[in-house]
Every structure is written in C-alpha cells, then in structure tokens.
C-alpha cells in the first residue's frame, strides 16, 4: 500500500498534524489534554477497519477513523474512554495473552 497518502502520513508526528492534514476542525484544548489518547484510538480504529483498495477510499477510512477518535474525547475524557492500558488496569480491565492461559 505505497501511495501518496502513505507518504504524506509518514511526515505527520502529532495529533494536530493529523487533524490539520485531514482538515478536521478541532478544539486545541481537547487535543492538548488528550493527544496521546486520540492517536491511540485512531490507531485502534484503523486496526479494526477493513482497508479498501484505492487511495481515495483509503483516505476516507483514515478521515473517518481520525474524526471518530477525536470526537470520542470532545465530550468525554481519557479516564472514561480507557484507551491506554494504564486506565484499563485501573478499572480492572486486563489482558492476558492466550498463550499464558492455563499455564502454571
């Protein structure tokens, strides 16, 4: 999947860079407080998405995933959304690799 979109994305480093690239309007305060959480949620949405053929369709998937990730934090917070493992563990959510189940 080597195309102009992927080349452009390689140059983006911050949540603001991604939001600006996809022309998604944002509140600077929301991003300042939640930038890592937004990027992790964006990553999670992309990992769950079925990536279509064609750069235009791929761009739409990326735009939708980032927009959704940002909007998750507009009326919520990191503790509620539990994106990062530190918040998942604090709420009792933990993941155990399947290879570790049943071993003593």
Image: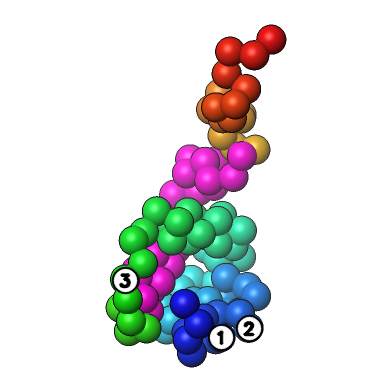
Name the residue located 55 percent from the left edge and 66 percent from the top edge. Answer: 31
Quadrant occupied by the C terminus? top right
Q: Specify start and end residues of the magenta stretch as a single range.
A: 58-85
Of the residues under marks 3 and 1, which one precedes in the sequence?
1
The numbered dot on residue 11 is 2
What SS does tag 3 mark? Answer: loop
Name the residue located 47 percent from the left edge and 77 percent from the top edge. Answer: 1
Q: Position of residue 94 (x, y in %)?
A: 57, 28
In this rendering, the answer to whether 2 lies above or below 89 is below
Given residues 78 and 102, the one toward you in this image is 102
Given residues 5 and 88, the one toward you in this image is 5
- Most prominent secondary structure in the magenta stretch? helix
- Looking at the image, can residue 34 be seen? no
Q: Quadrant of residue 89?
A: top right
Given residues 56 and 37, the one toward you in this image is 56
- Density class for disc 2 (Cα within 10 Å; few <14, some 14-19, many ≥20) is few
Residue topped by disc 1: 7
């Amino acid at each position: 999947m080597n195309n102009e979109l992927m080349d452009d994305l390689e140059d983006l480093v911050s949540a603001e860079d991604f939001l600006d690239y996809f022309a998604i309007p944002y509140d600077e305060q929301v991003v300042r407080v939640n930038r890592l959480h937004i990027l992790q949620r964006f990553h999670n949405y992309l990992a769950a998405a079925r990536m279509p053929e064609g750069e235009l369709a791929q761009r739409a998937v990326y735009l939708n995933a980032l927009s959704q990730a940002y909007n998750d934090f507009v009326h919520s917070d990191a503790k509620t959304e539990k994106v990062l493992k530190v918040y998942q563990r604090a709420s009792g959510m933990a993941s155990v690799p399947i290879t570790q189940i049943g071993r003593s």
